Image (tube, rainbow, N blue to C red):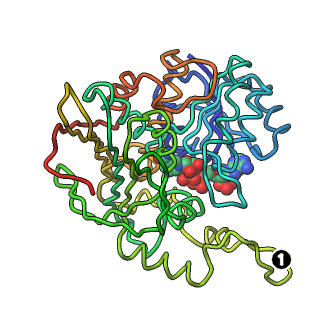
Amino acid sequence: MAKVVIIGAGGVGGVVTHKCAQLPEVFSEIVLASRTLSKCDAIAAQLSRPIKTAQVDADNVPELAAFLKAEQPFLVINVALPYQDLTIMDACLEAGVHYMDTANYEPLDTAKFEYKWQWAYQEKFEKAGLMALLGSGFDPGATNVFTAYLAKHYFDEIRTLDIIDVNGGDHGYPFATNFNPEINIREVSAECRHWEAGEFVTTPPMSKQQPFTCPEGVGTYDIYRMYHEELESLTKHYPTLERAQFFMSFSEKYLTHLRCLENVGMTSIEPIDFNGQQVVPIQFLRAVLPEPASLGPRTKGKTCIGCYVTGIKDGQPTTAYVYNIKDHQDCYAEVQSQAISYTTGVPAMIGAKMMIQGTWMKPGVWNMEQLDPDPFMADLNEYGLPWNVIERPDFEIQ
Ligand code: NDP
């Protein structure tokens, strides 16, 4: 049993709080802290169990460290924004608290995410006897564990990895993003990088596309290759990988809106002067788009996220595909959220549970695939994200 502080009361924060509250035997005390107290209180009011809420600015290390010293949690679950990762890690070190997040650090003024900043904390966390678990969402998160699970049980050596993230859901808006709009748009408009023959190769955004038919009748969708952060850690930890790619589905409607917003400069992260005030176009855009947390009641359809791996087993080439399918409306019925926040929040709860129970507990900074996948996979089945493996599926990814 342990006390946790959850930082961030957005779409993902709501789901993590619901899921932790469902397990009082693990999460004995929950504090939900965020920049806007009323958002924490609105989530707390949805729960059948009392939790504490607090206002905190996670950009301010002394303020956050003082807050953590006063609360003395076992662990901080960081589901604020990637910009806050390093300040929250610093505050955790100062207060002697374990750390976990779902997205790697990204500087506010450069649309570039990399693990190097957080990996640089390895020695500090190790020396302090603290653990930092990085990227415990779905992708990254469950996808890293899926890869580790296939590598452990289905292959002697993995050679190619294709992560395929399909959102077959529709929220009915002409344009809205399923998680934080600023982070989402920075991610999808960035240059694509994929792993090929021992190095990352850069190609223009959205320049490779193919149709993908999801299992269990979810449907056929156009998937587009893009860079995603788990490629960096997985290619490091599985050096036998000859190729690694990440694909995400987008509707034509979404892409047309995005192209238009890009063309008129609304996705820029460079501040402009507007009536004497400095305005960052993408931050203004975020303010006029629907909050991801508000999409829950309107989103219908299913997500299908999985990993397709090829490699060698007993001297023979083989393939396997592991995936989860989640229905948006089922998520809403359970925790008042759509499936994107749900599929992120559940692995976040499970990662925290693994650390609290000591199943995954070792000082230092770790990516998900560096830890034993089996208990995590068992918990995905138990807590709302059941998965399935298809051996030698009848499709190929180009
Ligand atoms: P939201 O924008 O809905 O929520 C972010 C929350 O963090 C908001 O409540 C915001 O407060 C709060 N916050 C922002 N800055 C601060 C700060 N300085 N101090 C305290 N609180 C702050 O985002 P999501 O819930 O959609 O995403 C949360 C995280 O999950 C992001 O890092 C995202 O990248 C990650 N993610 C990971 C996925 C995965 O599969 N691994 C998938 C989807 C998301 P306020 O509302 O007041 O602005």
Residue 27 sits in quarter: top right
Q: Which of 182/292 is in front? A: 182
Q: In what element is the residue under mark 1?
A: strand
Amino acid at pointer 1:
Gln
- Classify 386 as above or below 163: above
Q: Is residue 154 left or right of residue 227?
A: left
Residue 103 sits in quarter: top right
Residue 8 locus on image (x, y percent): 63, 45
Residue 274 locus on image (x, y percent): 79, 82
Residue drawn 40% across the image and 53% down it: 246
Residue 301 locus on image (x, y percent): 29, 58
Residue placed under numbered mark 1 in the picture: 277
Residue drawn 47% across the image and 49% down it: 341
Q: In this view, does 349 lie to the left or right of 116?
A: left
Residue drawn 65% across the image and 40% down it: 7
> In what quadrant of the picture does the N terminus appear?
top right
Q: Taking the image as drawn, is residue 37 in sight?
A: no
* Outermost front residue: 197
Q: In this view, does 125 lie to the left or right of 264?
A: right
> In what quadrant of the picture does the C terminus appear?
bottom left
Mark 1 Cα shell of 10 Å, populated few (<14), some (14-19), many (≥20): few
